[in-house]
Amino acid sequence: MSSNTAPVSRPVHRVVFTNLTFWVLIAIIAGILLGHYAPKTGMRMELLMTSFVFVIKIFIVPIIFLTIVLGITGMGSLKEAGRIGTKALIYFEVVTTLALLVGVAVANIIRPGEIDKSGLPVQDASKYTSNASKGIDWVVFLKSNLTLQVLIIAIIAGIALSFVKNKQPFVQRLSWVSKMVFTGLKYFMYLAPLGAFGGMAYTIGKFGLHTLVPLGKLMLTVYATMIVFVFGILGLIMRYYKESIWRFLQYTREELLLVLGTSSSESALPSIMEKLEKMGCSKKVVGLVIPTGYSFNLDGTSIYLSMAVIFLAQLYNVHLTWGEIISIIGMLMLTSKGAAGVTGSGFIVLASTLTAIHRIPVEGLAFLVGVDKFMSEARAITNIIGNGVATIAIAKSEKEFVAVTE
């Protein structure tokens, strides 16, 4: 073999130090250390996290709009778009219901609420629960959830554009804009380590590592349950479609580390869409499933909500009947869909559920406020993995998946 055909090897240190995953991981570790040893300084780093997430949210609006519109217009017909959308919604409801059942089952087996209450860091949860008796105001929820608003507008615009006879010029312009948006996002993502650093430094600086001790059992149970769900339920779904959940996690490790650092699955929405397309999912399926999943397919949130209710029941030594547990699952099947995109909405969902069953004191939510921030990482990571698996499943079932050979 001639020398000009020999593979070019890059030094290991160059590969490592130019890898974004490496820098995000270093930023997370640095943030933890700063928050622990200099908590006041760590809390000031919140600006880095909020600024990074704010800019990401600016990207999210055009990305959701453009991908949904291009996804619908790229379909062979509106019937095809409706079929994929309906299939996705059925999938979301089935899998999130499984997530609720898993959460209830594990909480009843491990019983994390049976711990000494004297050391729990009780905080004021009134700002989350003051409107609990009213339940979720869906009008307010819709008005305050920009993602859902853009989703609805994009669907209407996509359907309208599908009826235009000469739609190709419009589609070409939208495709060009979409390309420019993703290019801009690609360069902005080089700042991801700053966002991850700020998020971890603020979290540890404000709450401290010691606050995890009293509620450690609950946290470990939540994390363990989500790991079991990812490798169990989602793993089986991937295996059914002849894919590997482990390979998918490795492929999206940069996005998962970013979510871990910022505690927001929205921060990785644009890049996960791009990754799924490169993996082999068609653009039209990704454009429909991912944005919709961010409002309706919240596996991690569903697990957390069901476990939190059972945890509080155990904390107050309230013995729930199977009928009451089934009622709780039924309520959370509906209300958990309103637990995304609105700060504190998860607590309102929990408070509404507790108020409805009249067995568990709503004030018990005060026990969860102090550690909710630490569990949000698990929820966000599980949510984004769940949406990725859903996209692959829908693409495979629609024969809209082309395996990429490396």
Image (cartoon, rainbow, N blue to C red):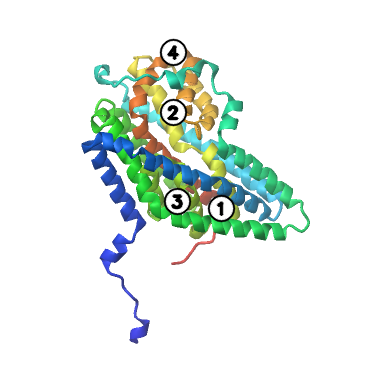
Q: Earlier in the sequence, mark 2 or mark 1?
A: 2
Along the horizontal axis of the image, is 69 left or right of 160?
Answer: left
Q: Where does the image place residue 253, in percent across and percent down from the top left? A: 38, 52
Q: Amino acid at mark 2?
A: Leu
Q: Residues within 10 Å of mark 3 (few under 14, many from 20)?
A: few
Which of 279 and 191 lies nearest the eye of the viewer? 191
Classify mark 4: helix, strand or loop.
loop
Q: Amino acid at mark 3?
A: Arg
Q: Where does the image place residue 16, in percent across and percent down from the top left? A: 29, 61
* Spatial separation of the CA atoms under disc 2 and disc 4: 16 Å
> Is there CB contact under 8 Å for labels 4 and 3?
no
Q: Earlier in the sequence, mark 2 or mark 4?
A: 2
Look at the image and tell me in which quarter the C terminus lies.
bottom left
Nearer to us: label 4 or label 3: 4
Which of 19 and 91 lies nearest the eye of the viewer? 19
Q: Amino acid at mark 1?
A: Ala
Q: Residues within 10 Å of mark 4 (few under 14, many from 20)?
A: some
Look at the image and tell me in which quarter the N terminus lies.
bottom left
**Mark carried by residue 395:** 1
Please determine whether, in this image, residue 349 is positioned above or below residue 374: above
Residue at 37 percent across and 43 percent down: it is 48
